[in-house]
Image: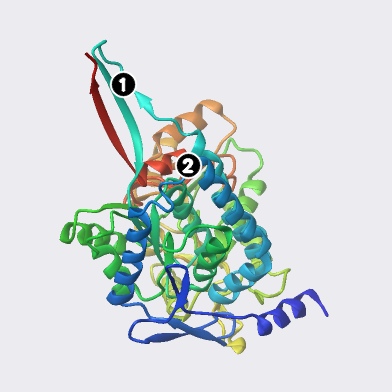
């Protein structure tokens, strides 16, 4: 068999289970409701998935609260939690083929990326927080001789986690790692568009020794299970990754319930700024194409606004347009495929609508722009490059979440900074310049949570991830993520 046939064959043999995981057990919905999950690869039926409702969220939260209150997890020494979480990470790696195949079938990304990026990144995240938890020290405040003031971090309680469909495992791990390591219990609501790996992760967690009730998963729709979780009076915090539109609702749900903490990681429209003093614009073009078209452009940090100095803009546009065909959509189960399927028909229509808007507003489509592979029944769009774009156009201002890039021009450094910052978002940015003063000056001026210099796709769990403005609040990754899932307590002791 060829490698592609091998993965296709494995897909037919894969055991799929769409039930929830509550108190360590696979369970059906309280009212028995399900929804049919189809693959964006070719619209094949995958399985029926639990359609969680308020009663299911209530059951999961009760389980999580009981586990927290009896301290079956939070009461364990950090070194003990570390060992169990390390076993969890090992279990993830041990199930790498199954998890990668689930991810590809569920949301359409190429199998090579699921296997080479998503699974190892998920495992590394869990292992990194496991290793970190017994190395995070508390503090003693400076006081007079008659007092001892202890500043300690305590687990917050029950954490509600709501994650999107574009990186289902990685986004879950970014919340699970610090939340579980700190001693919290978790109720995870995955996207209804890609719920399957979340349920399998919960099973692997129990196998690794995480006590039942500590990590629960309830699939379902956002307006049902997600809303019930965000409104729940016994949930202490919500870690949310998704759209800015729904992020606003999360803040509203907090105000309508128990004022739970809400940490939003939201959208982006990241600027990729290329100056004419950078002498290898071919590398810049290759980098922006690889970053933009990775994961079908379904990334909140995708560098979708490419700002290029006027003197090299024509050359750069030609180079990046020539890169686009290298990412032609293909069968996600073929290990050579670089760009897979969009997650569903709704997203396909959204992306094609933005491409139509680019044409209507006068931009020039220099590459791609078409739906392809329609005979498969899947949802595929060519990598698309628009030139002649102004910052007022819809394609330059709104998050598309698809493989669509806009190339804009600037004449001066000041204009580049103003254009880059003229956005509701501030997630990431990139500066390309061999002038060290300019690189530092522009990086400092850009209003973004991460600024890359002369690269874009280099990253690690050790650095924080999050944005300015409407890209959200709080930070995922790094030690800073512990801030979201712990309470600070001061214990002031009088010494006589």
Q: Position of residue 247 (x, y in %)?
A: 30, 59
The residue sitting at 42% across, 53% down in the picture is: 72
Q: Position of residue 159 (x, y in %)?
A: 35, 56
Label 1 secondary element: loop
Q: Is residue 65 above or below residue 79?
A: below
Q: Quadrant of the C terminus?
A: top left
The residue sitting at 66% across, 47% down in the picture is: 283
Q: Which sits earlier in the primary sequence, circle 1 or circle 2?
A: 2
Q: Is residue 304 visible?
A: yes
In the picture, measured across the screen, residue 482 lies left or right of residue 367, that is: left
Q: Position of residue 203 (x, y in %)?
A: 53, 67
Instruction: Spot the residue most to the left.
Output: 256
Q: Nearer the viewer, mark 1 or mark 2?
A: 2
Q: Position of residue 290 (x, y in %)?
A: 62, 56
- Viewer-proximal residue, 213 or 242? 213
In the picture, measured across the screen, residue 45 lies left or right of residue 359, that is: right
- Viewer-proximal residue, 264 or 452? 264
Q: Is residue 33 above or below residue 56?
A: below
- Viewer-proximal residue, 105 or 127? 127
Which mark, residue 77? Answer: 2
Q: Quadrant of the N terminus?
A: bottom right
In the picture, measured across the screen, residue 396 lies left or right of residue 323, that is: left
Label 2 secondary element: loop
Instruction: Spot the residue most to the right.
Output: 1
Which mark, residue 211? Answer: none
Q: Are marks 1 and 2 in contact (CB under 8 Å)?
A: no
Q: Is residue 139 above or below residue 242?
A: above
- Hey, which quadrant is residue 474 in on the image? top left
Measured in 3D between alpha carbons, the distance from the residue under mark 1 to the one under mark 2, in whole angstroms, is 24 Å
What residue is disc 1 on?
A: 141
């Amino acid at each position: 068999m060829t490698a592609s046939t091998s993965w296709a064959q494995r897909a037919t043999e894969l055991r799929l289970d769409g039930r929830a995981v509550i108190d360590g057990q696979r369970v059906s919905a309280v009212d028995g409701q399900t929804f049919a999950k189809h693959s964006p690869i070719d619209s094949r039926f995958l399985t029926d998935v639990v359609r969680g409702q308020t009663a299911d969220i209530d059951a999961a939260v009760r389980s999580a609260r009981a586990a927290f209150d009896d301290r079956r997890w939070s009461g364990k020494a950090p070194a003990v939690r570390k060992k169990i979480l390390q076993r969890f990470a090992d279990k993830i790696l041990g199930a790498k083929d199954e998890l990668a195949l689930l991810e590809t079938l569920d949301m359409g990304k190429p199998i090579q990326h699921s296997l080479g990026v998503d699974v190892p990144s998920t495992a590394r995240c869990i292992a990194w927080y496991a290793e970190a938890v017994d190395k995070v020290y508390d503090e003693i405040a400076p006081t007079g001789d008659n007092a001892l003031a202890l500043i300690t971090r305590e687990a917050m309680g029950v954490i509600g986690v709501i994650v999107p469909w574009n990186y289902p495992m990685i986004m879950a791990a970014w919340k699970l790692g610090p939340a579980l390591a700190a001693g919290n219990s978790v109720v995870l609501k995955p996207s209804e568009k890609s719920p399957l790996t979340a349920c399998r992760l919960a099973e692997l967690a129990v196998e690794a020794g995480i006590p039942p009730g500590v990590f629960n998963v309830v699939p379902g729709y956002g307006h049902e299970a997600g809303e019930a979780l965000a409104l729940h009076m016994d949930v202490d915090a919500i870690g949310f990754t998704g759209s800015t539109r729904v992020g606003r609702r999360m803040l509203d749900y907090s105000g309508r319930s128990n004022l739970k903490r809400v940490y939003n990681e939201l959208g982006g429209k990241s600027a990729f700024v290329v100056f004419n003093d950078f002498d290898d614009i071919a590398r810049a073009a290759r980098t922006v194409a690889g970053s933009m078209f990775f994961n079908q452009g379904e990334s909140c940090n995708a560098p979708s606004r490419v700002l290029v100095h006027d003197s090299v803009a024509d050359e750069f546009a030609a180079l990046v347009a020539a890169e686009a065909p290298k990412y032609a959509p293909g069968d996600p189960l073929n290990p050579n495929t670089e760009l897979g399927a969009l997650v569903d028909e709704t997203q396909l229509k959204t992306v094609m609508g933005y491409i139509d808007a680019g044409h209507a507003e006068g931009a020039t489509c220099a590459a791609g722009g078409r739906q392809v592979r329609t005979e498969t029944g899947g949802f595929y769009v060519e990598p698309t490059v628009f030139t002649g774009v102004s910052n007022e156009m819809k394609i330059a201002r709104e998050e598309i979440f698809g493989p669509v890039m806009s190339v804009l021009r600037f004449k001066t450094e000041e204009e580049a900074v103003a254009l880059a910052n003229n956005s509701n978002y501030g997630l990431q940015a990139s500066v390309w310049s061999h002038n060290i003063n300019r690189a530092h000056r522009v990086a400092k001026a850009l209003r973004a949570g991460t600024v890359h210099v002369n690269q874009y796709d280099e990253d690690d769990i050790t650095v924080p991830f999050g944005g300015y403005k409407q890209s959200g609040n709080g930070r995922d990754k790094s030690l800073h993520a512990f801030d979201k899932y712990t309470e600070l307590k001061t214990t002031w002791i009088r010494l006589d």
